[in-house]
Amino acid sequence: MKINQWTLGLAAVGVVSLASAVNAEEAKMNALQTALSSTTISGYVDTSVEWTLREKGFGTTPGIQNFIPFRSGKQDGFNLNVVKLTIEKPLDESEWAAGYKVDLLFGPDANGLATGSPTSGDVGYENSDFGIKNAYVALRTPIGNGIDWKMGVFDTVIGYETFEAGNNPNFTRSWGYAVEPTEHTGILGTYRINDMISVAAGVANTLSQSINDRGNFNSSLPTGTEAESWHKTFMGSIAVTAPSDMGFLAGSTLYGGMVIGINNGGSPITGVGGGDQGNYYLGATLNTPVAGLKVGASFDYVNDFGGVKQDVWVAGVYASFQATEKLSFHARAEYLEAEGIITHEPGKLYELTGTVQYDLWKNVISRLELRYDEVQADKGFTFLPDSGASLYANFIYKF
């Protein structure tokens, strides 16, 4: 046990006893060990190989999707995607439980998430291959069945897919994910009404993901107005889970949500803007009578995408089949339609993705994926890729 020099000096002249000092230090250590005993550390390393089969890659115009490899400069080569480190103390079962969660990102995909704060001084808030995905204090208040709160930076409440490729059925992200918000700085409350239904509601600074951003940060917004000084983002969701007595449908989920507020990032369709945007989402994942087979569907509608008068909607369907303990197959099909900006003809996109996953090594996700995008749009849709296919291999180690 190490005792600081000041305490040793007091003990030497008889002001304090050495035994009491040792007991005090042990009490501090026990308190520290108790505080850390329920803290967990986890994460993953995500790598990939990509071969572009399309005639040419995507241009340099800023777009809406940073996690489709052809969109983020990962064509024809080997890639480190991201390293994630999670430090967390989950809520326990007590009435006044408290905890926290911190997700730290390292690597190119951390730049794509763009969660740096607007006061960091970085151009585009990219933070040089570093990002904070979640950083919140978790609290429970014993009201009814208990309300669980998150205060800080947390994931958005809508969407079929997540930032973590390993938690999605496919390696590349969907276009539905592309038009959704990702993170918010604010407060979120979740309440489980019963075993079937849970709801969530929250308030955040902005719909866009930059940490500590403000609804009046973008200079294109009106100045000197009350709305500008207090313009927040509001969100809500509801999840319904089929109970155990519903046969093969048991555990199936239906989910809906919305996020309405300021998108300071502007529109990737026009490259300008920043203002009010509304995201509306509905999705479902269903078990089937066929053992190992699940199907899903998602629908995203974005009103005033990027804060300008442009609307986008995306519909997607999913299927996953667990053939053996290690082998699984996953498929996704999507249709995107965006309001025209030059000829006013709608831009359209069709996407098909097929993935084979075989978990040969312990703790490792290993998969091969083929993706094809067919684009039918005028030249104004700079956020859409060229038509064509890409082939991917993805390896993720989870710890």
Image (tube, helix red, strand yellow):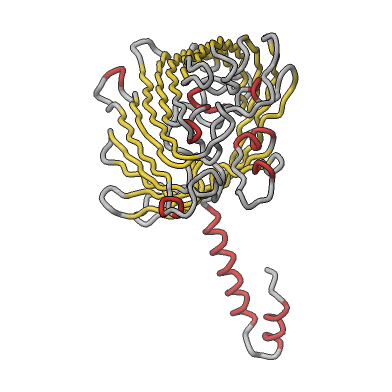
Give left or right: position of 90 versus 18.
Answer: left
Q: Position of residue 342 (x, y in %)?
A: 53, 19
**Which residue sits at x=37%, y=57%?**
96
Up/down of 223 relative to 29, above or below: above
Query: Which residue sits furthest right?
Result: 77
Q: Position of residue 138 (x, y in %)?
A: 45, 51
Quadrant location of the N terminus? bottom right
Up/down of 203 relative to 48, above or below: below
Residue 322 can be seen in this image = no
Front one among 282 and 124: 124
Quadrant location of the C terminus? top right
Front one among 34 and 260: 260
**Which residue sits at x=48%, y=33%?**
308
Q: Position of residue 98 (x, y in %)?
A: 44, 55
Q: Quadrant of residue 378?
A: top right
Q: Quadrant of residue 67?
A: top right
Give left or right: position of 135 versus 79.
Answer: left
**Which residue sits at x=62%, y=75%?**
22
